[in-house]
Image (spheres, rainbow, N blue to C red):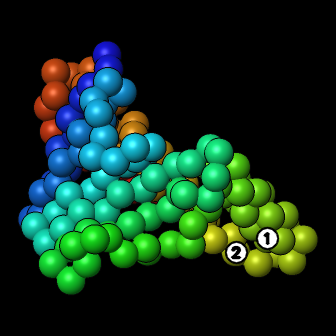
């Protein structure tokens, strides 16, 4: 499978869809992900060779794009993650991405898998 659509219904009544495709062409070169909303879009770009990666917002106030994060090289982002882990281990502080964050993400992925196995029926996301 190279493409799938995930539809999510939130307790608030809001619905969202995520399209995952490994064969579709992005809006911009090296776009890892694009979030499209009613007021604009955000692209997450990766750059393996230079520091052209990062998150950029396009909306009515920023039709040419506005950086939401500092420019970074793909490998530098991994360095920042490892440094955060090391700092959390050494100091006992909470890392930027917590265990609960990771478990919540995993719950969504597992629910999507259960839904796919059951013909696409809606399933509840387990609470951690």
Q: Which mark is residue 4?
A: none
Q: Say what secondary structure mark 2 lies in.
A: loop
Q: Say what secondary structure mark 1 lies in.
A: helix
Residue bearing mark 2: 94
N-terminal label among 2 and 1:
1
For residue 1, above or below residue 10: above
Is residue 127 visible in the rendered image? The answer is yes
| Picture residue at 34% right of the left edge, 48% below the top | 28
Q: Is residue 28 left or right of residue 41?
A: right
Residue 59 sits in which quadrant?
A: bottom left
Pick out the residue farthest to the right. 90
Q: CA distance from mark 2 to mark 1?
A: 6 Å
| Front-most of residues 11 and 6 | 6
Pick out the residue farthest to the bottom. 61
Tally of numbered discs: 2
Horizontal and vertical percent for residue 107? Answer: 42, 46
Location of the N terminus by quadrant is top left
Q: Is residue 74 left or right of residue 52?
A: right
Horizontal and vertical percent for residue 66? Answer: 36, 75
| Front-most of residues 24 and 93 | 24
Q: Is residue 63 left or right of residue 110?
A: left
For residue 24, above or below residue 46: above
| Picture residue at 18% right of the left edge, 68% below the top | 40
Residue bearing mark 1: 88
Is residue 125 visible in the rendered image? The answer is no
| Front-most of residues 55 and 49 | 49
Residue 18 sits in which quadrant?
A: top left
Horizontal and vertical percent for residue 69? Answer: 51, 72
| Picture residue at 25% right of the left edge, 78% below the top | 62
For residue 56, above or below residue 114: below
Marks 2 and 1 in Cβ contact (< 8 Å): yes
| Picture residue at 27% right of the left edge, 56% below the top | 35
């Amino acid at each position: 499978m190279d493409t799938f659509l995930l539809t999510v219904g939130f307790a608030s009544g809001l619905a969202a869809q995520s399209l995952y495709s490994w064969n579709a062409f992005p809006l911009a070169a090296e776009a890892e992900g694009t979030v499209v909303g009613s007021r604009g879009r955000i692209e997450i770009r990766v750059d393996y060779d230079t520091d052209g990666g990062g998150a950029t917002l396009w909306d009515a106030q920023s039709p040419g794009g506005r950086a939401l994060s500092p420019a970074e090289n793909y490998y530098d982002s991994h360095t920042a993650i490892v440094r955060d882990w090391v700092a959390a281990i050494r100091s006992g502080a909470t890392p930027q991405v917590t265990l609960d964050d990771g478990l919540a993400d995993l719950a969504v992925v597992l629910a999507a898998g259960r839904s796919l196995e059951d013909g696409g029926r809606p399933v509840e996301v387990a609470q951690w």
